Amino acid sequence: GAVVSQHPSWVICKSGTSVKIECRSLDFQATTMFWYRQFPKQSLMLMATSNEGSKATYEQGVEKDKFLINHASLTLSTLTVTSAHPEDSSFYICSATAQTGPGNTIYFGEGSWLTVV
Amino acid sequence: QKEVEQNSGPLSVPEGAIASLNCTYSDRVSQSFFWYRQYSGKSPELIMSIYSNGDKEDGRFTAQLNKASQYVSLLIRDSQPSDSATYLCAVNPGYNFNKFYFGSGTKLNVKP
């Protein structure tokens, strides 16, 4: 299957600082990538859909100025959490779609644990 | 009504038994269906995809699709404690290959 790599796996940052998470498709080109957030014992929550070369589409309630998404190439999307606060501490997961069968399949990165102190 | 519905569980089965996980979806024109496994603290990993009515087997896993009844299921034979995880059902509606709806997941506990 297609491989999606996410970095860093975990990061601790101070309140008020920004942190960047990278998501790479290693063996395929990903026109579309997704960013999810998951709090402990809760469901995946889609934050935004990232399209290469265009602006990301954010889900309702997600602040686009706080969660900056850049998808500058067909293999890389980045999520920057700006002015992070403790309530932003969560598990952030990226994913990418690859064409398989009659449509696309979604593959997930390993996820990034963010702790804001 | 949610696009994809799953029983949250937990579903408890003894080791060696068959675990049956179910999922229903609302969009009748959905084309592609997926099962993911998510261990606690990890990201989801793809187990199986299914596109046509009927059964699809892969090792101890069998996915079953019934488009007329709008449900998809996952059977795990000879369940092992290592199968204990949350299983997510995902559906691609077909009108947009980059749109995926996820269920909230069913937590499976396999007891030794």
Image (cartoon, coloured by chain):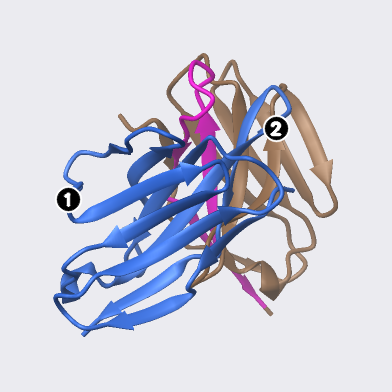
Chain colours: A blue, B brown
B103 vs A51: above or below:
below
Amino acid at pointer 1: Asp
| Image coordinates for residue B103, horizontal then vertical, percent | 44, 43
Q: Quadrant of residue A78?
A: bottom left
Q: Where does the N terminus of chain B fall, quadrant-wise? A: top left
The residue carrying mark 1 is: A65
The residue carrying mark 2 is: B50
Residue closer to the observer: B17 or A63: A63
Residue closer to the observer: A49 or A102: A49
B16 vs A79: above or below:
below
Amino acid at pointer 2: Ile
The residue sitting at 56% across, 29% down in the picture is B71
The residue sitting at 72% across, 22% down in the picture is B52
Residue B51 magenta-drawn? no
Q: Magenta part of the protein: which range?
A: B86-111
Q: Left or right: A12 with respect to A110?
A: left
Residue B94 magenta-drawn? yes
How far apart are labels 1 and 2 at the CA level? 38 Å
Chain bearing tag 1 is A
